[in-house]
Image (cartoon, grey):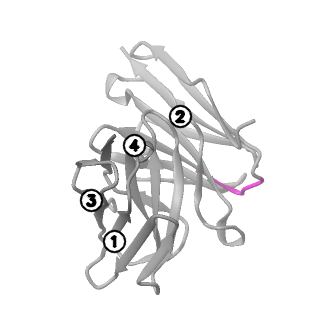
Amino acid sequence: DADVTQTPRNRITKTGKRIMLECSQTKGHDRMYWYRQDPGLGLRLIYYSFDVKDINKGEISDGYSVSRQAQAKFSLSLESAIPNQTALYFCATNGGNSGANVLTFGAGSRLTVL
Amino acid sequence: SQQGEEDPQALSIQEGENATMNCSYKTSINNLQWYRQNSGRGLVHLILIRSNEREKHSGRLRVTLDTSKKSSSLLITASRAADTASYFCATALNTGNQFYFGTGTSLTVIP
């Protein structure tokens, strides 16, 4: 099983719908991140969390919210999806100073908003 | 934006040649990392270089870091078709809390 699992892998939805992307990890890492990838723009940080009680905004948090349900679970929500949120979304984890301080990524969730 | 930039955006070489890609960033960093992404897949960590290091090697990979110029380069020697992928640099700020990615270099290695 993958260390970082994202669901769904692909989703097509309509403008205005609420969407949740889920991420779970078996790494035992405290730090979790959500990134968005668009062609030519690389990866941009949406939100990150260092433990269940810690949530921080990244570069592009507008239009998104997150929930850290447990150490192993970090969900990203689009309350009212719009077409320019069509992108590839990645969840990642990091062991922080106790680990190698590198990111472990999930396989990605491709979201299309019509 | 904290995001760095990489050049070239795309690189096409013959198998066996060396591939060099560059990364520039904007702020002081704790370390810089390189990741690889096969088409549509998740990123995989390749190598990390700390801000007090100037060069690091791992197999066919060689990374350099010039903090005075805020730039790094990744050299892949004796490239293989299997090296075809996108390569991203990521900077970890001095707080070590956040990671910011460059725009990526798409490498094609022709057999």
Residue A29 lies, with reference to residue B70, above or below; the image says: above
Mark 4 and mark 3: Cα distance apart in space: 25 Å
Mark drawn on residue B81: 4
Q: Is residue B88 left or right of residue B99?
A: left
- In the rendered image, residue A13 lying in the magenta stretch gets the answer no
- Residue marked by disc 2: A108
Which of the image's four quarters has the C terminus of chain B? top left
Q: Chain of mark 4?
A: B
Specify the amino acid type for callout 4: Ala
Q: Chain of mark 3?
A: B
Q: Quadrant of residue B55?
A: bottom left
Mark 4 and mark 2: Cα distance apart in space: 24 Å
Name which of mark 1 and mark 4 comes first in the sequence: 1
Quick one: SS at disc 1? strand
Residue B68 lies, with reference to residue A10, above or below; the image says: below
Tag 4–tag 2 contact (CB < 8 Å): no
Name the residue: 47% across, 77% down: B56
Quick one: SS at disc 4? helix
Q: Are marks 4 and 2 on the same chain?
A: no
Q: Chain of mark 2?
A: A
Q: Is residue B73 left or right of residue B51?
A: left
Q: Are marks 1 and 3 on the same chain?
A: yes
Disc 2: CA contacts within 10 A as few (<14), some (14-19) or many (>=20): many
Residue B111 lies, with reference to residue B76, above or below; the image says: above
In percent of width and height, residue A15 lies at 39, 16
Specify the amino acid type for callout 2: Gly
Mark drawn on residue B72: 1
Name which of mark 4 and mark 3 comes first in the sequence: 3
Tag in front: 1 or 3:
1
- Residue marked by disc 3: B5
Q: Is residue A89 left or right of residue A37?
A: right
Specify the amino acid type for callout 1: Ser
